[in-house]
Image (cartoon, rainbow, N blue to C red):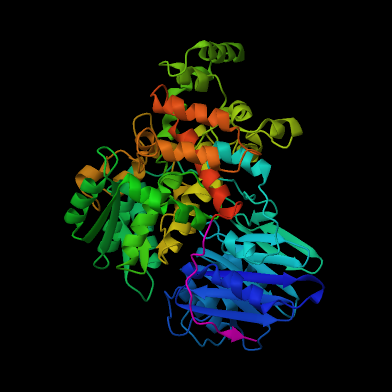
Amino acid sequence: MCGFVSLFNKYRVPVNRNMLQKMTDTIAHRGPDDENLYIHDHIGLGFRRLSILDIEHGTQPMTNHNQDIWLVFNGEIYNYKELKDWLVQKGHIFHTHSDTEVLLRLYEEVGFECVNYLRGMFGFSIWDRKKELLFVARDHFGIKPVYYSENAFGYMVGSEIKSLLASGGMNREVDENALYQYLTFQYVPEPATMFKGIYKLEAGHYMIIQEKGVTIQPYYEVKFAPNENRSFSDLAEETRFVLSESVRIHKNSDVRRGAFLSGGIDSTSLVGLLHRLEPTQTFSVGFDMPGYSELEEARKTAAYLGTEHHEIRINAQEYMDILPSLIWHMDEPVADPSAVGLYFVSRLASQHVKMAFSGEGADEFFGGYQIYKEPYALRMFQDLPVGMRKAAGQLAKLMPAGMKGKGFLERGSLLLEERFFGNAKIFMDHEKDQVLSSWLSEAGVCHSTLQVTKPFYEQAKHYDEVTQMQYVDIHTWLRGNILMKADKMSMANSLELRVPFVDTKVFEWAATIPTKYKVTPAATKILLREAMKDVVPPDVQQRKKLGFPVPIRVWLKKEWYEWAKNLIMTADVDRWINKSYVLQLLEIHKEGKLDMSRKLWTVLVFMMWHQLYMEDQTQSFSVPSKKKIIS
């Protein structure tokens, strides 16, 4: 796991070495083990390395025999050994045992098609001197981030936004449309970022940068193809085999490894499968408040499986102390309170291992979220005439806030695409008129939240409602929230995080599972639980998903109230946020009238981010290291 930056200057303007160095230093946390630069006229590549595979010989930027192709690569290619054998048969000669060199030779052999051969997590940039182009790609599901921007001098690409900002060639401006969508999703959906002029390369896409401009192409498409003809027992057996194989191939490394353990079915399955292959260390995090911790469950699970277990417990002050650093590492606001837990468990793990497994992706692929049961609960509304459904919605509007049944009628009156935007839905569009400054609405710069999800519903319209929800989550929630925080919080601690559920082979299999074996009115992840029954402790098999709850609801009433009020008053965000409305939300929450914690947290995280990145109330977190120049 590493970090990279790439510069492509237009009009053959030479790369400024000091600027490239500064950009590379900014992401030292992603790779504290080694650093190199490559500069050739108007092209610059910077690299920070976290050594995981072929520690002695995997140095980057890496070049071919003729030195006309140069590569910087962040991630892991899990099928690199098979690809290497094939490339050797094709006549390629290798000088290392690294997956980086396999990717380099693969590009030599098949060019842009190389992405279709890869099984892994990656973001990479290849300078092809003969073709005078920069080829950039991001993995199928967006496990690793890739950002890009264009300025007057040319194009910049990097593993993190902060490296692009370190160039000094950008004006830091809030993208108001991104802010509008953030208030609903609690993150900024691809391809936008909160910075105007900086974009995410979407998952499953590659980009070609040339003097004449940029071309972006998709190379991977998420498709579900349920197979109703196989028995439940056969499907369970095959699921166990596919996941076992994914764990086996994901554990390939030359360093010590462990796994995060929450006590739920996802992480326990990975730990159980990994521990069958080798002794495993496990790591857990919780909060010092009853009902907000799975530490006891994780401890029992670790004892059952026989792992060497480590745990950490966080309190309100520790959470607050680390929050500025967390938001700096995240690059843009991501208002998922559980990100702090990931930060602490990554820090704990990094003291013992260099690589860890985590259970991200199981819910999206195998149907694990409780919200996926909603289509069954609302089925009674589907047969109602449109007029009656609308009447139910009107009745709900007349009911007092918090009244039992109000939410049920509201959601039942809406079509799926009108009520489900992914796993987070913080502010609805009509609420944004209150939380945003009035000029934003008057200027007409904001749009409907439906603009983000409508294309996905159009692509998934032939699926049942549960599968449509999975499809939307894979394209929004998984990329923008789950995988984003996993990458940034682990890399903040120089820890490589691997997610064996988020794998092309695993998804290809999961896509064939009939909905009835994923979600029913009573249960979720049915097939996964059955497949893992001999791997996990009996009590874990049917344990409900806790979802790593964070006690911000309680802390915002007590320990954090004064802090929140002061932040609202002092943050220089009046251009964007209606502070008087946010202060009203804070008082409503403090008095216990309604739970406004998630709405408040979404705004507060934006305010802190604005202070750090727009008001320059930040400090350098870069790790100094030896510098080496390749020219």
- Quadrant of the rendering where the C terminus is positioned: bottom right
Instruction: List x then y, in percent, for residue 25.
Output: 55, 72
Does 627 appear in magenta? yes
Rendered residue at 42%/60% (across/down): 490
Does 66 appear in magenta? no
Quarter-of-image position of residue 66: bottom right
Quarter-of-image position of residue 8: bottom right
Instruction: List x then y, in percent, for residue 160.
Output: 57, 61
Asked whether residue 225 appears in the rendered view, the answer is no
Instruction: List x then y, in percent, for residue 430.
Output: 61, 26
The residue lying toward the viewer, choosing from 77 and 476, is 476
The residue lying toward the viewer, choosing from 543 and 200, is 200
Tell me if 580 is positioned left or right of 444 in this view.
left
In the image, residue 393 sits, relative to residue 554, either above or below, namely above
Instruction: List x then y, in percent, for residue 2.
Output: 50, 70
Q: Is the magenta stretch mostly helix, strand or loop?
A: loop
Q: What stretch is highlighted in magenta?
A: 618-631
Tell me if 446 is positioned left or right of 273 in this view.
right
In the image, residue 122 sits, relative to residue 631, either above or below, namely above
The residue lying toward the viewer, choosing from 223 and 629, is 629
Rendered residue at 56%/49% (across/down): 611
Quarter-of-image position of residue 434: top right
Asked whether residue 340 appears in the rendered view, the answer is yes
Tell me if 592 is positioned left or right of 533 in this view.
right
